[in-house]
Image (cartoon, rainbow, N blue to C red):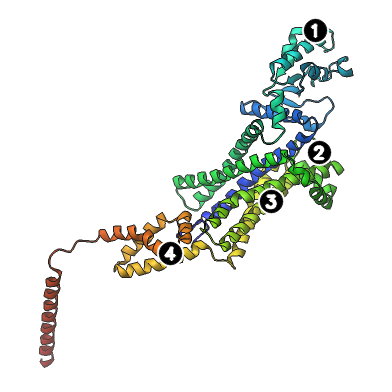
Amino acid sequence: MSNRNGSLKPNVNEEIRIPAEAAGRGVGAEQIVNHLYDQEKFHAWQGHGFAAEQANNLHDKLLGKDARILGDDCAKNGPDRIVNGRWIQSKYYANGRNAINACFEDAGKGAFRYVGKHGEPMVIEVPKDDIIYEQALKAMREKIAKGQVDGVNDPAQAETLVKRGNYTYQQARNIAKAGNIDSLKYDATNGAVTAASAFGVSAVIAFGTCIWCGDKPEVAAKKAAFCGLKVGGTSFIVSVISSQLLKAGLNSAMVSSTEAIATALGPKACAVIINAFRTGSNIYGAAAMRSAAKLLRGNVVVAGLTVVVLSSFDIADIVRGRISPGQLAKNLAETLSSVAGGTAGWVGGAALGSMVLPGVGTVVGGVVGSLGGGAVAGVAASALAGLFIKDDAEQMCALIEERIGLVTVEYLMSEDEVKKLVNSVSRRLDGSALKDMYASSDRPAYVSEFIKSDVGEIVSERSHIAGDIDSQIADGLVRLLEESTEKEKNDGCEGLA
């Protein structure tokens, strides 16, 4: 039995690969879509401020801090972020004094607006720029001296209330846009985090399935690592490209179509879906429909890019003549169905899991949904396409089997020698070799050259025949005739008796 990778041996890898990859892609897609959902704020007039919040939050997380964004709660005078239990309000202004003035009532003349749950003032995060930071410190000292910060009387405490951010004002503006180094570095960092999650899920599922299928732990570990790297790499590429495309304005082109889908789903269905992915308080009605449309835009972009990335090698192969149009169509159908099924499974599973057990249930439901949806859809598409299209690998394997049959006759190979030949060829035969064979102008000659070394090695192990073969055969013939004559005499004497 052959598979898409072109193995001659019966192989359970497809049964392992499809669900493991579907689950990993589902986890990666969920993180990417949520990231894209948050990035839609970058298009607002204060988009660089939202970019600063997310960039600083990611930076703190990578340093091992307990950091998360709280601004989605939309609470009046609420914090933007929380880091190790401390509430933070981000104010990314080009001028530090303006940033501090924005934290006080009456355009800077009134009381400090940002107060924690225990009455303590929140920390104000400003750009990393030395000038802006010093301007902010000076302004905060003046406000404290004037008694505008309740409970704080010492101007020196300004240094504990004003925090230098991890990014400059210009870097924050760059991150909110596409096509610059700061933006690419930020998206690549996010992509690496997403890739690690996708890798872990795929590798764990693949490892467990391999063990259950009878593989030794060391073999299962190698297969699991390969599966994880493939899914993680895909997630990384899709994460970076999708973020850059949405920053460039791709989302604007899909607004009408995704809003039409949200309208068709209705406010109740949209609320169930969107609230499964939100970190803030639940939303309903028109707000839920708008948010669901944003989520759909992210899913469309991620699913489309995933198909493109997964199909890129097949497209390169057909350009180089290494696979047939039929094989490309079959592979593409399997990829499309698997990605679409995994995406639908993740959204549906996450929504159901969130209803049963918010938080953990959302993740578990999403993994189970994408695993089932992606695997079933991929296998179904592959089976359906297989009814009409024969794999290139199957055709090439048939050619190899035919040539091996001729070689066994040509070299008078024994049964054990034939088994050795088949095993040796199978170990060296992979998808790349089969594609090179397909691209060859003389496939029989390619196969003969491919198995030549295996045949030579097996034949060289035969016992060496010493002496004059003709004389030995002649002697054997004489002995055979003598034995036959003697046997006839004996038979004749027994008959007379």
Picture coordinates of residue 307, whole percent (x, y): 63, 51
Whole-number angstrom distance, CA of label 1 to CA of label 3? 56 Å
Which kind of residue does numbered mark 4 sit on? Answer: Asp
Helix, strand or loop at disc 4?
A: loop
Helix, strand or loop at disc 1?
A: loop
Whole-number angstrom distance, CA of label 2 to CA of label 3? 22 Å
> Pointer 4: residues within 10 angstroms few (<14), some, or many (20+)?
few
Does 192 sit left or right of 294 as displayed?
Answer: left
| Label 1 sits on residue | 153
Tell me which label, 2 or 1, sits earlier in the chain: 1
Whole-number angstrom distance, CA of label 2 to CA of label 1? 39 Å
Q: Which of pointers 3 and 4 indicates the residue nearer the eye?
A: 4
| Label 4 sits on residue | 442
Tell me which label, 2 or 4, sits earlier in the chain: 2
Helix, strand or loop at disc 2?
A: loop
Which kind of residue does numbered mark 1 sit on? Answer: Asn
Tell me whether the residue at label 1 lies in contact with that at label 3, contact meaning CB atoms closer than 8 angstroms.
no
Helix, strand or loop at disc 3?
A: helix
> Pointer 3: residues within 10 angstroms few (<14), some, or many (20+)?
many
